Amino acid sequence: MAGISLKHINKTFSGGICALADFSLDVNDGELVVLTGPAGSGTSTVLRIICGLESPTSGEVYIDGSLCTYSDARERDVVLVTNEHPVSNRKATVYDCLAYGLKLRKYPYEEIDSRVREAAAFMNIEHLSETKACELPLGDLKRVALARALVRRSKVVLLDNILDGLEKSDRIALISDIRKVNKKLGTAFVCSANDSADAMTLGERVAVMKEGRLRQCDAPQWLYDNPADAFVAAYLGEPAINMLDGKIMFDEGKLMLDTGSRLLPITRTRAKRLLGLKEECTNIIIGIRAEDIHAEQMFIEASPDTIIDGSVRLVERLGGESLIYFKTDGRAQTLIARVDARTAVNEGEQIKLAVDINRIQLFDKTTGRNLAALPALNMLACRLEPENNGSLSLRMGGESHPVPAAVASRLSDRSVIGEEICLAVPPDGMELEPFEGSVALTGDVDFTVEYPSYTAVYLKIDSCEKTVVAVVPHERDLSAGEKITVYVSPEKQILCRKSGERLMVSRPITDNTAVARVDAAQGGATAVVGKSKLKLVGEWQSGARNIRIPPIAVKLGKGENTMSATVLEYDFTGERTILYLRIDGFEPYFTAAVSGAVDVGIGDKIKLSVAPSDISSAEVLPLTEYIKSISK
């Protein structure tokens, strides 16, 4: 079980500002993961949600296997060290700073003293014990803050931009200390870092974020060599990766790369990973790292097909290496090559360089996705169809797969029944063993690619003639041509439009059925549910009756029938906001689907209204009939 598990976390602040969008991350006990990204990426928000200082709009937080999404921060056994306030009282001595947390928890003096002295010795700050925190240089102050985490021995340690403001030598020393404390405690560490180089140096895994979304999380070198998209490629590395507009074309049956000035061959291994590419692709970006452009004569002679001619604009001599800024024929932009410092080249000269074709990156210009990387989702075309027994099924080719109730109840737009949609499945959402409610996909193994912690299997599915990618453990030995079946659990089944827009929300959409006390008086029938008194129209009989309010019929604000509600959670689908509400009499909760984005927060008290004509008797309906009734 992971020390920390974040599942589909969304966070929207007042004014509709989205801080996190569908963020998921697992951190194992003893693992050190670093979150990084440009300003506004949401790295600090992730840490605040883990420790309980912020509540997510939706999603789940698990610490040490226990659900604690909305539990109090004091109950989580988490240490958070921030850059702004590494210690709480800067007028106290270092000893008192280290002992403060244990004193609050009323630990015995002997244990407090033992822990403080042990931590101080481990961090080599014993000589600072009687020094006031305000007298310490910034580097020592942050080491004291780290020692506090060691004293506490918490399940989780969070470090928020703790490396900021330090000179390089102090940063390197603190990084070494953080890794040392992580190994000593053996607990989950999650850090944020504004500098990508610091993140790459510190983390066992690095999670790159942008605008609240996790773009990629992996080992530092793997991230650098195999970026999931153009943003990750550009964010990591100095100098930044060279980006060229280009296109992929066929030349005598071979895939070639047109850079504008010459054609470069695409290796067979790379070509096989360009899924679904059957014709020219004119809308791509070619990524070439500076160190993958070579000036050595031996490399040039061995790679005649990848030679490019350049006009040198500037040579930046860094001592151990040089950066050559050059232009190629037909291009206005300047490219950068990292070469040996002894390379004889000067400004204004012409130079021959060769590209390491095995290390170039190819990105979709529209989406930024690495064309050879694992897809975020496998998109399988299907039709959502109603069955005679009232359930739903997905038809792919000649096969029909029942839709589990847990999936059908989370469908946000019921009008897509009978239409072509997509079943979206993440590569890690497929298992080799069947289980209840799973969708079975059978096909032939095309080829496999070894990754640091798993094997990616490229599988040609029989029912839809499409290649999907499944992630399996290293120990499962699969070979090309082998026929296998993979199974998609209900938790991993995502229904989407063909455009990729999701059709599912985080919770089941309830039918808002409740037992009401109906009074069918001559002046008009009314229904009392909990604390709400609702007007009815039509023929009703007095007594206890089941009523139903379609989610789509609910309006925000006061009206003819007004109800008071508390916001439990909400989703935004792009067209509607789905509100999950607590209203007396409706169990387990009440669902409202209102048009547009709504400025609400978890725990807010709001008013809702529903027209009398939209309240109906709640006789039992098959699922498909219910869906039709709330989609009108």
Image (tube, rainbow, N blue to C red):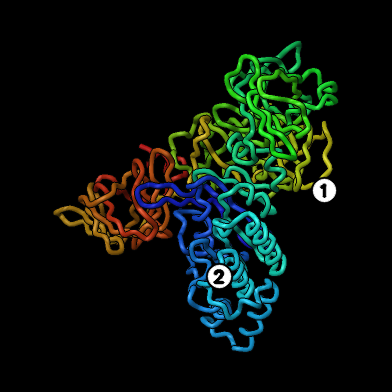
Residue at position x 75%, y 40% in the image: 320
Q: Residue at x 70, y 54 (%)?
A: 204
Whether residue 141 is situated above or below residue 97 in the rendered picture: above
| Label whose residue precedes the other's in the sequence (2 or 1) | 2
Q: Give the image location of residue 38, x and y in percent.
A: 52, 45
Image height check: is 232 above or below 398?
below
- Nearest the viewer among 125 and 75 is 125
Residue located beneath label 2 in the image: 136
Of 164 and 269, which appears nearest the observer?
164
Q: Secondary structure at mark 1?
A: loop
SS under mark 2: loop
Q: Residues within 10 Å of mark 2 (few under 14, many from 20)?
A: some
Query: Disc 2, disc 1: CB below 8 Å?
Result: no
Residue in the image at 25% along x and 52% along y = 540
Query: Is 273 positioned to the left or the right of 50 in the image?
Result: right
**Apparent side of residue 564 relative to residue 217 in the rendered image (left or right):** left
Q: Which quadrant is home to the C terminus?
A: top left
The location of residue 619, given as percent across then percent down, is: 38, 50
Q: Which residue is mark 1?
A: 475
